[in-house]
Amino acid sequence: MSRPPRPPMPSTRPTAGGDGQVRIIGGRWRNTRLPVPRLDGLRPTGDRVRETLFNWLMPVLPGARVLDLFAGSGALGLEAVSRGASTAQLVERDPARAAALGEVVARLQAGAQVQVAADDALHWLERAPAFGADIVFIDPPFAAGLWTQALQRLPRHLADDAWLYLEVAAGGLPFALPGWSPHRQGTTREVGYALYRRAAATLGNDLNATPSA
């Protein structure tokens, strides 16, 4: 008996209009498609990288407050809430992209959990009230080189035992971060990605231990 063909798992899929899609891969919104317009610098985190990341974060996701800077497609922040995070703040500079994220949130009936700010991430970090994020995603357009500026403005928005995810161009790791301890990292042909924990929360912890709340 022949086996049915295995469905593909692309990072993005072209649509009739020339744009793409990325899907939420786990949790209550699993397989929800998120639109990805073809804009310079917009590069959604791929399925396999997200699956790895959320396996790392699984023990700390339930009830977490998530901050998704440079939200883009919203795949990271929405995936987190889909898998059990309590709230997510998405920050997206492009007004049309932010409006599209708002439409996705409305379609998912997630307005009580997910907020979208149409704002530059650096300006938002400077002006917004302290957020108390348990998990932060920083995945800016690579060409803009905004990691350092975002990290400088981030501390007042963090919980004491916060976790931080960074995504950089391939070959960009290790990424030394004062005040953070490296926890896990990986690479693909296109990107390097790493998870860190605030240094004060890691004292006495084994670097290779499973994340704990």
Image (tube, rainbow, N blue to C red):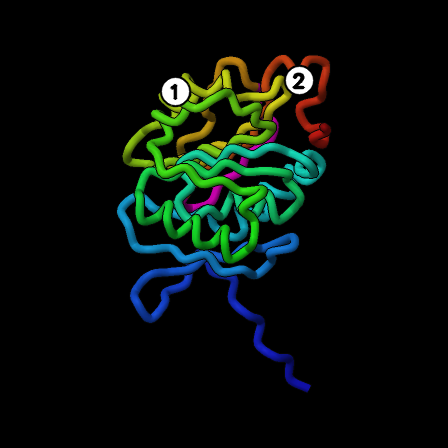
Q: Residue at x 50, y 36 (%)?
A: 89
User: Chief secondary structure of the magenta span?
Assistant: strand
Q: Earlier in the sequence, mark 2 or mark 1?
A: 1
Judge the density around disc 1: few (<14), some (14-19), many (≥20) Cα neighbours within 10 Å.
Answer: some
Which residue corresponds to mark 1?
Answer: 126
Local secondary structure at mark 2: loop
Which residue corresponds to mark 2?
Answer: 202
Local secondary structure at mark 1: helix
Q: Residue at x 36, y 38 (%)?
A: 118
1 sits left or right of 157 in the view: right
User: In the orientation shown, which residue stands out farthest toward the bottom?
Assistant: 1
Q: Which stretch is magenta?
A: 181-190
Q: Of the residues tagged 2 and 1, which is closer to the observer?
A: 1
62 falls in the magenta region: no
Task: Give above or below for 62 relative to 21.
Answer: above
147 sits left or right of 18 in the view: right
| Residue type marked 1 | Glu
| Residue type marked 2 | Thr
Image quarter hosting the N terminus: bottom right
Task: Give above or below for 119 relative to 73.
Answer: above
List x then y, in percent, for residue 143.
28, 35
List x then y, in percent, for residue 70.
40, 37
Task: Give above or below for 77 relative to 184.
Answer: below
184 falls in the magenta region: yes
Judge the density around disc 2: few (<14), some (14-19), many (≥20) Cα neighbours within 10 Å.
Answer: some
List x then y, in percent, for residue 86.
64, 38
**Mark-to-mark CA distance, 2 and 1:** 27 Å
Q: Residue at x 55, y 18 (%)?
A: 180
List x then y, in percent, for residue 137.
49, 34
Q: Do labels 2 and 1 touch, CB within 8 Å?
A: no
101 sits left or right of 57 in the view: left
Q: How many marks?
A: 2
